[in-house]
Image: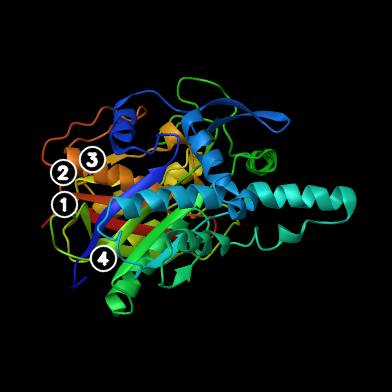
């Protein structure tokens, strides 16, 4: 990449909290934020927003009559976007694009309206506009009064990192100078849990760590759902406000052998990581924030891909799904946030199931992975300030 793309601000809204200091404190803790909750008429292990953030969502919902009919996915994105822009130097500018996606979109509202239709044969007037996937970026644009392009999309669980790719492309093309990118997801519904259980990938055992990401001795799948949003301000910049640079990007799509899983060798990850590295020697990468959803095949495939690309120089490995579950379309940007916090604090966060890994040098380059149904892998290489 010729010109440097900088992340100049980042904000999130998740079980970790919405304040950078609080989020880092939660990462330093060895405690999982996954617990048993009532989801509709069932009980399930999930990572849910803390009560104080739920209250912020309700306050936003009732702050404007137009917001009362919006899905939680949209409200999460609005709050995270407000914070990201407030922390940037964009506050007096409306000239920025927006690309915030979601794997499932307006999950709660869609299920609510569909249930009403099955029961009564009718739906509310706003059932269509409030459940379209384009809802997210358009409402964020409305809230922030931006004047740039608005894009919403779904590329399953790699959605947020694909948004980052799109932002980089717009900036590199010269069609925009600033882009707000990210993902938002509110999937904690009984129907969504039932879908994951039907695929036999969902965690069923309550323990200290219900989601056993990168535990290669597990005999059961242990994926757990989480919720939240994360967004980042991207621009071509080289000044003191830079949190990290996007040094490399990679993407790949596999030829599907199955509608759910990637190949045993995770060929998509091999290609995306190789592309993100470019001419950078693999040994310069200090950490990989893995996708690793807590499934037997998903975790093993990504590890095989890492071994294929990095050989005997495998970096430190970490992830956050053991702590906050899988947030689907938001997960990639939450992983980027984790990477940036580790770079800022020069501190590696271990995973409970791998042998303790020792940080032996300053953290300067971190690779972030994400992949979703359909084998749509993305890898993003982040580096510290130049």
Q: In the displayed image of the protein, which residue is found farthest to the top?
A: 207
State which quarter of the image contains the C terminus. Answer: bottom left
Tell me, what colour scheme is on the image?
Answer: rainbow
Q: CA distance from mark 2 to mark 3?
A: 8 Å
Q: How many marks?
A: 4
Does residue 370 appear to the left or right of 87 in the view shown? Answer: right
Q: Is residue 180 left or right of residue 157?
A: left
Toward which corner of the image does residue 323 lie, by quadrant? Answer: top left
Q: Which residue is mark 1?
A: 384
For mark 2, give the secondary structure.
loop
Residue 345 visible, this angle? yes
Residue located beneath label 4 in the image:
235
Q: Which residue is mark 3?
A: 342
Q: Is residue 115 left or right of residue 16?
A: right
Query: Residue 325 placed where, x, y %?
Result: 48, 37
**Label 1 – label 3 distance at C-alpha:** 10 Å
Figure check: 167 above or below 15: below
| Spatial separation of the CA atoms under disc 4 and disc 3 | 21 Å
Q: Residue at horizontal 43%, vertical 37%?
A: 321
Residue at the (60%, 39%) spot, across then down:
188
Q: Choose the circle earlier in sequence order: 2 or 3.
A: 3
Q: Secondary structure at mark 3?
A: helix
- For marks 2 and 4 on the same chain, the one whose residue lies earlier in the sequence: 4
Crowdedness of circle 2 by 10 Å Cα count: few (<14), some, many (20+)?
many
Comparing marks 1 and 2, which lies closer to the viewer? Answer: 1
Query: Residue at position x 41%, y 46% from top?
Result: 291
> Does the CB distance between marks 2 and 3 fall below 8 Å?
yes
Name which quarter of the figure residue 206 lies in.
top right
Q: Residue at x 49, y 42 (%)?
A: 326
- Image mark for residue 363: 2
Residues at marks 2 and 4 touching, judged by CB atoms closer than 8 Å: no
Q: How far is disc 1 from disc 2 in space, using C-alphas?
A: 8 Å
């Amino acid at each position: 990449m010729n010109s440097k793309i900088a992340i100049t601000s980042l904000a999130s809204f998740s079980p970790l909290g919405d304040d950078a200091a609080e989020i880092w404190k939660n990462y330093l803790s060895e405690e999982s934020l996954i617990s048993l909750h009532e989801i509709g008429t069932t009980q399930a292990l999930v990572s849910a927003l803390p009560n104080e953030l739920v209250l912020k969502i309700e306050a936003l919902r009732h702050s404007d009559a137009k917001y009362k009919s919006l899905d939680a996915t949209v409200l999460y994105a609005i709050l995270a976007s407000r914070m990201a822009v407030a922390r940037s130097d964009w506050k007096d500018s409306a000239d920025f694009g927006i690309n915030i996606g979601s794997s499932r979109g307006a999950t709660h509202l869609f299920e609510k309206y569909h249930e009403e239709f099955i029961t009564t044969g009718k739906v509310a007037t706003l059932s269509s506009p409030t459940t379209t996937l384009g809802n997210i970026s358009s409402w964020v644009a409305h809230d922030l009064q931006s004047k740039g392009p608005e894009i919403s999309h779904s590329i399953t669980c790699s959605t947020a990192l694909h948004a980052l790719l799109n932002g980089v492309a717009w900036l590199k093309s010269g069609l925009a100078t600033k882009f707000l990118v990210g993902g938002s997801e509110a999937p904690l519904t009984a129907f969504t849990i039932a879908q994951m259980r039907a695929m036999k990938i969902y965690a069923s055992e309550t323990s200290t760590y219900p989601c056993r990401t990168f535990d290669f001795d597990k005999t059961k799948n242990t994926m757990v759902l989480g919720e939240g949003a994360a967004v980042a301000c991207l621009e071509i910049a080289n000044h003191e406000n830079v949190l990290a640079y996007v040094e490399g990007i990679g993407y790949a799509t596999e030829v599907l052998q199955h509608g759910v899983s990637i190949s045993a060798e995770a060929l998509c990850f091999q290609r995306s990581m190789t592309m993100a590295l470019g001419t950078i020697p693999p040994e310069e990468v200090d950490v990989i924030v893995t996708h690793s959803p807590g499934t037997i095949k998903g975790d093993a495939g990504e590890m095989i891909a890492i071994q294929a690309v990095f050989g005997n120089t495998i970096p430190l490995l970490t992830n956050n799904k053991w702590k906050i579950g899988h947030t689907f379309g938001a997960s990639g940007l939450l992983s980027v946030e984790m990477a940036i916090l580790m770079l800022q604090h020069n501190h590696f966060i271990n995973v409970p199931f791998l042998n303790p890994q020792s940080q032996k040098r300053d953290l300067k380059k971190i690779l972030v992975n994400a992949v979703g149904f359909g084998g749509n892998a993305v890898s993003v290489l982040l580096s510290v300030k130049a």
